[in-house]
């Protein structure tokens, strides 16, 4: 099978229709179905369109064979924001449908998601109360926005993800994520979680042990060298490459969201794009599972 965006969208459409199609709603059915909406959102991220207006104009010219009906920008934006729960379910469905779901080694990291560049934007933004000021040590810069916490397999398949205020502690956010997804975590036996020093803490490690998770992280300056530390440097580069895919190829920092729902769905779109590409590459035995090259044109 040739890997291109049309085969990916067709396979995803069939997958969603087969596994996530709910009962028929009362009243007139939507002209653009939920399956088509998710595929349209996926194509937007893979093809690099950060503007919904530009995207719908392009799709109306080049993708009418796949999407006979396209809504106006306001209708598309409204449908997309209300589809956040559906997109999350699709991401989880794709992860479970791949070989990566069986991996018992997970990597966790956080990366900035800037949401404003001026003081005036901060004052009038609808994100006030959720977003905040943070510091990105890897780029030596301050920013105003959110932090994306991503738990993925070494290959990059998303397992858990969340957006949080940068001022909230990393351990607190991850503990909340594991609490919300406790049932999913219990499906995996003997998870090895690899993190950086920011997740260090005796109480936190004890909490992870209750979930059956072993934490592997670099030692702090006031600690002795921890078991398995020499291998961490190479493994940690994997999560950095995943973040680079989200930022470099999927334009994570150029999401354009101006409200809580807007930012959430735009980040979810990028994670969906990466998960869908990996799912399809895995199903078609592509040599590089996280490659998006076949789908970005």
Image: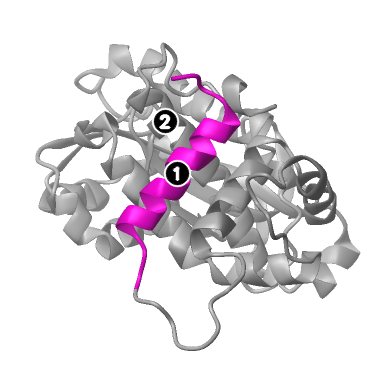
Left or right of 99, for residue 134 = right
Residue 229 on image: x %, y % = 28, 18
Residues tagged 1 and 2 counted as in contact (Cβ below 8 A): yes
Q: Secondary structure at mark 1?
A: helix
Task: Answer above or below: position of 13 versus 11.
Answer: below
Q: Earlier in the sequence, mark 1 or mark 2?
A: 1
Is 25 rendered above or below residue 112? below
Which residue lies at the image location 37% right of the left edge and 47% below the top edge? 15
Q: Which residues are magenta?
A: 1-22
Can residue 289 be seen in the rendering of this structure?
yes
Image spot of residue 191 (x, y percent): 17, 37
Instruction: In this rendered view, identify the residue nearer to me: 147 or 295.
Output: 295
User: Which residue position is annotated with label 2?
Assistant: 280
Majority secondary structure of magenta residues? helix
Which residue is drawn at the image coordinates 67% and 72% (left, top)?
Answer: 78
Residue in the foreground of this view, choosing between 54 and 118? 54
Q: Which residue was labeled with disc 1?
A: 12
Which of the 4 image quarters holds residue 247?
top right
Residue at 34% over, 27% down: 283
Does residue 8 show up magenta in the picture?
A: yes
């Amino acid at each position: 099978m040739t890997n291109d965006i049309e085969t990916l969208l067709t396979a995803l459409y069939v997958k969603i229709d087969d596994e996530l199609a709910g009962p028929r709603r009362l009243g007139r059915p939507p002209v653009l179905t939920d399956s088509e909406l998710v595929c349209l959102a996926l194509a937007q991220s893979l093809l690099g369109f950060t503007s919904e207006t530009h995207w719908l104009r392009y799709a109306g010219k080049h993708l009418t064979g796949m999407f006979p009906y396209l809504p106006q920008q306001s209708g598309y934006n409204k449908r997309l924001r209300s589809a956040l729960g559906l997109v999350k379910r699709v991401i989880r469905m794709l992860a479970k449908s791949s070989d990566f779901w069986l991996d018992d080694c997970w990597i966790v990291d956080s990366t900035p998601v800037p949401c404003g560049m001026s003081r005036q934007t901060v004052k009038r933004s609808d994100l006030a109360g959720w977003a905040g000021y943070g510091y990105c040590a890897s780029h030596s810069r301050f920013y105003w926005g959110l932090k994306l916490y991503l738990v993925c397999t070494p290959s990059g398949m998303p397992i858990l993800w969340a957006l949080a205020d940068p001022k909230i502690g990393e351990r607190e956010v991850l503990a909340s994520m594991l609490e919300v997804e406790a049932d999913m975590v219990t499906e995996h036996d003997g998870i090895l979680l690899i993190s950086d020093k920011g997740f260090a803490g005796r109480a936190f490690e004890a909490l992870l042990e209750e979930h059956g998770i072993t934490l592997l992280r670099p030692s702090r300056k006031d600690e002795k060298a921890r078991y398995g530390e020499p291998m961490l440097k190479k493994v940690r580069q994997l999560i950095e490459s995943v973040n680079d895919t989200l930022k470099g190829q999927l334009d994570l920092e150029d999401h354009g969201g101006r409200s809580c729902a807007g930012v959430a769905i735009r980040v979810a779109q990028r994670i969906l794009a990466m998960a869908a590409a990996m799912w399809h590459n895995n199903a078609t035995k592509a040599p590089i599972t996280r490659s998006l090259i076949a789908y970005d044109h």
